[in-house]
């Protein structure tokens, strides 16, 4: 753990050193303003790890300034890195022009009368001096004032763009989740169960920046769907029951025909998973811990299974994900829907013939282009995909983690409609 924290601090330090170079050193001349900018960047570098640690220890007042800077820092870094190529090209063009201007055109020889002066034993006429540098020397670099102007222009563009993107992301993140509807055909689904609806939500992330009103809004959205089942697929909280129990209380008002179900996400294991399992059960949601529930509806039967999050392994506080316990020894003629927080669980679930897995965890990437990095870890980032023959639907989640910012991945609650062949 100490090694990981050291790595995080190192990365944060390197990012802020780069921001200092591009936003402060390159845009100012030596003096007071450069020193002020350096102190500001250093303070912001310290703010990031202090926020990450402080919000886990009840210093919630750090959440807004700290996490907003994390988002702004991220987009400043991305935009400045993208600008490296065009600014390097402009610098190269300016340098070549400066060298060409310094060398100047080839001087024309002075006309001379043949035989004049030299024929009489005199000296040849003087040659007019030129501005060309001596042979073997380099032309001077382009004007430092132009270099300063270019750096300031890039810094201003990056700052305004990053601020605009972050502002848009804040508005999206704290706004109401969008309601998406998706139809997923299941080959084994009985004709009588065609149209069975599962309201699916994940990553609510109650915590320093999200409270009871957030839960109430999500519950109201789900209840308007008139769903047959409700599936809450992990990462409900970022805090203990003592801190967030009141914020989770509206979950007891969830309405569905055949029940509401919950599986743990990785953040439950940071927040006291055993207490939260008991609390969620008290609120009326059936917690599926490596088990399955037979759903009898409309004259047909469907198996609804759930596994603990893959991060449970090694925690010592809960059983790891056990696919055999949840999916083994069942009637293979029945369709089975698996609730698993992380999409990567499908790699194991597919071995048990799971028809559909409902997941969250990825937040859809939350902040473009971070979604590209998520693809390195998860087989499906957002929407409907397939892993080894198992269909996997990944919802973006209704909340956020860390920065209160969503860009390219709006918060989402999904109504999954199962269709028979």
Image: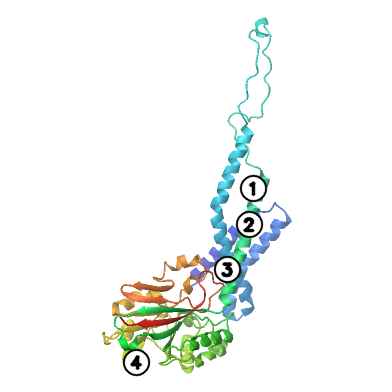
Q: Residues under labels 2 and 3: Cα distance?
A: 17 Å
Name which residue lies at 68% across and 53% down: 28
Q: Residues within 10 Å of mark 2 (few under 14, many from 20)?
A: many
Q: Residues under labels 3 and 1: Cα distance?
A: 29 Å
Residue 233 in the image: x percent, y percent? 44, 82
Secondary structure beneath dot 2 equals helix
Q: Is residue 104 visible?
A: yes
Badge 4 vs badge 2, beta-carbon distance below 8 Å: no
The earlier-in-sequence mark between 4 and 2 is 2
Q: Which residue is mark 3?
A: 71
Q: Is residue 313 visible?
A: no
Q: Is residue 242 above or below residue 118?
A: below
In the figure, is residue 232 to the left or right of 25? left
The earlier-in-sequence mark between 4 and 3 is 3
Residue 243 in the image: x percent, y percent? 57, 87
Q: Is residue 105 above or below residue 166?
A: above
| Rendering quarter of residue 353 | bottom left
Residue 231 in the image: x percent, y percent? 43, 85
The earlier-in-sequence mark between 1 and 2 is 1
Secondary structure beneath dot 3 equals helix
Q: Which residue is mark 1?
A: 147
Badge 3 vs badge 1, beta-carbon distance below 8 Å: no
Q: Which residue is mark 4?
A: 298
Q: Residues within 10 Å of mark 1 (few under 14, many from 20)?
A: some
Q: Nearer the viewer, residue 98 or 173?
A: 173
The earlier-in-sequence mark between 1 and 4 is 1
- Mark 1 vs mark 4, foreground winner is 4
Q: Residues under labels 4 and 3: Cα distance?
A: 48 Å
Q: Which residue is mark 2?
A: 155
Name which residue lies at 45% across and 68% down: 374
């Amino acid at each position: 753990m100490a090694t990981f924290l050291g790595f995080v601090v190192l990365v944060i330090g390197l990012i802020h050193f780069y921001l200092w170079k591009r936003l402060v050193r390159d845009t100012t001349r030596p003096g007071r303003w450069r020193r002020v900018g350096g102190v500001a960047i250093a303070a912001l570098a310290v703010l990031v790890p202090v926020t990450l640690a402080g919000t886990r220890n009840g210093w919630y007042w750090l959440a807004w300034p700290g996490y907003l800077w994390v988002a702004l820092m991220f987009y400043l870094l991305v935009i400045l890195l993208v600008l490296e190529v065009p600014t390097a090209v402009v610098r190269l063009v300016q340098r070549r022009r400066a060298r060409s201007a310094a060398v100047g055109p080839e001087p024309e020889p002075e006309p001379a009368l043949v035989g004049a002066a030299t024929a009489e034993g005199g000296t040849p006429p003087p040659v007019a001096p030129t501005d060309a540098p001596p042979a073997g020397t380099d032309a001077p670099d382009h004007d430092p004032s132009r270099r300063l102007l270019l750096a300031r222009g890039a810094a201003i563009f990056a700052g305004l763009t990053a601020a605009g993107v972050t502002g848009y992301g804040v508005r999206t993140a704290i706004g109401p989740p969008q309601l998406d509807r998706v139809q997923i055909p299941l080959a084994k689904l009985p004709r009588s169960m065609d149209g069975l609806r599962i309201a699916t939500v994940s990553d609510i992330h109650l915590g320093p920046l999200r409270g009871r009103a957030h839960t109430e809004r999500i519950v109201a959205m789900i209840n308007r769907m008139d769903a047959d089942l409700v599936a809450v697929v992990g990462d409900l909280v970022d805090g203990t029951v003592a801190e967030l129990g009141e914020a989770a209380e509206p979950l007891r008002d969830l309405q569905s025909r055949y029940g509401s179900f919950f599986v743990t996400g990785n953040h439950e294991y940071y927040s006291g998973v055993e207490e939260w399992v008991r609390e969620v059960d008290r609120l009326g949601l059936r917690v599926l811990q490596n088990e399955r529930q037979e759903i009898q509806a409309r004259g047909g039967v469907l198996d609804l299974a759930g596994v603990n999050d893959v991060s449970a392994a090694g925690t010592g506080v809960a059983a790891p994900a056990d696919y055999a316990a949840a999916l083994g020894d069942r009637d293979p003629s029945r369709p089975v829907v698996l609730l698993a927080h992380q999409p990567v669980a499908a790699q194991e679930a597919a071995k048990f013939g799971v028809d559909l897995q409902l997941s969250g965890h990825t937040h859809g990437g939350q902040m473009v282009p971070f979604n590209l990095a998520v693809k390195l870890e998860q087989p499906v980032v957002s929407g409907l995909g397939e892993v080894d023959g198992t269909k996997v639907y990944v919802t973006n989640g209704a909340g956020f983690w860390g920065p209160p910012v969503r860009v390219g991945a709006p918060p989402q609650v999904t109504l999954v409609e199962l269709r028979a062949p």
